[in-house]
Amino acid sequence: MTVYTADICDEHYDKVSLLQPHYQNYGGAENCQGEVVTIKLDKNNSDLISLLRDEDGTGKVVVVDVDQAYYAVVGENLMKFARDNHYAGIVINGYVRDTAQIKDIPVALYALGTCSRKSIPVTQGERDIPLSFGGVDFKPGDYLYADTDGIIVTAEKIV
């Protein structure tokens, strides 16, 4: 069943938060929906690698905040991990790379843009904490819906 963010906004106006429009989808899935898993990174994506590679993502969307640092957070390898562990999508307050390779991987990947460089020094991230960016507060367990019209978040699954 395809769910459209415009319909959800029309029917549940008072229950949705709408992410600002600067995010583009670079993944192979045109839309996604799922329970929010949050992770805050300090440029380096090693904690995100562990999450996508080692944990079942069925019915989940990972929301990543790197404070718009100009480094690629997700590329081809992480998208393959996300696909293999059944994540519906990833939303990044940052950048991605390997876009030619990831456009056919059936996982939605929303980001601000692209950057060829990744951050090498390993730094510690934080999991399952509230995040705030793009005019939206994300909490672990929230529900996210995304399509070509936008990205919305609700406190609970409403569709």
Image: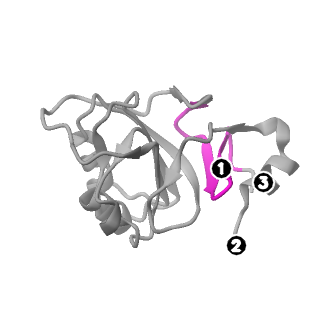
Image quarter (top left, top right, bottom left or bottom right) of the N terminus = bottom right
- Determine the secondary structure under disc 3: helix
Amino acid, disc 3:
Ala
Q: Is residue 30 rendered to the left or right of residue 125?
A: right
Q: Is residue 125 rendered to the left or right of residue 68?
A: left
Among numbered discs 2 and 1, the one appearing first in the sequence: 2
**C-alpha gap between disc 2 and disc 1:** 18 Å
**C-alpha gap between disc 3 and disc 1:** 8 Å
Among numbered discs 3 and 1, the one appearing first in the sequence: 3
- Determine the secondary structure under disc 1: strand
Q: Do the residues bearing badges 3 and 1 touch, measured as CB atoms within 8 Å? A: yes
Which of pointers 3 and 2 indicates the residue nearer the eye? 3
Q: Nearer the viewer, residue 61 or 148?
A: 148
Q: Nearer the viewer, residue 101 or 41?
A: 101
Indicate the position of residue 8 as horizontal and vertical percent values. Answer: 79, 52
Up-down relation of residue 80 to residue 40 (above or below): below
Up-down relation of residue 132 to residue 107 (above or below): above
| Image-quadrant location for residue 125 | top left
| Image-quadrant location for residue 121 | top left
- Determine the secondary structure under disc 2: loop
Q: Residue at x 50, y 27 (%)?
A: 130
**C-alpha gap between disc 3 and disc 2:** 15 Å
Q: Which residue is mark 1?
A: 150
Q: Which residue is mark 2?
A: 1
The magenta span reads: 137-157
Among numbered discs 3 and 2, the one appearing first in the sequence: 2
Q: Residue at x 74, y 57 (%)?
A: 159
Q: Which residue is mark 3?
A: 6
Q: Is residue 157 rendered to the left or right of residue 87?
A: right
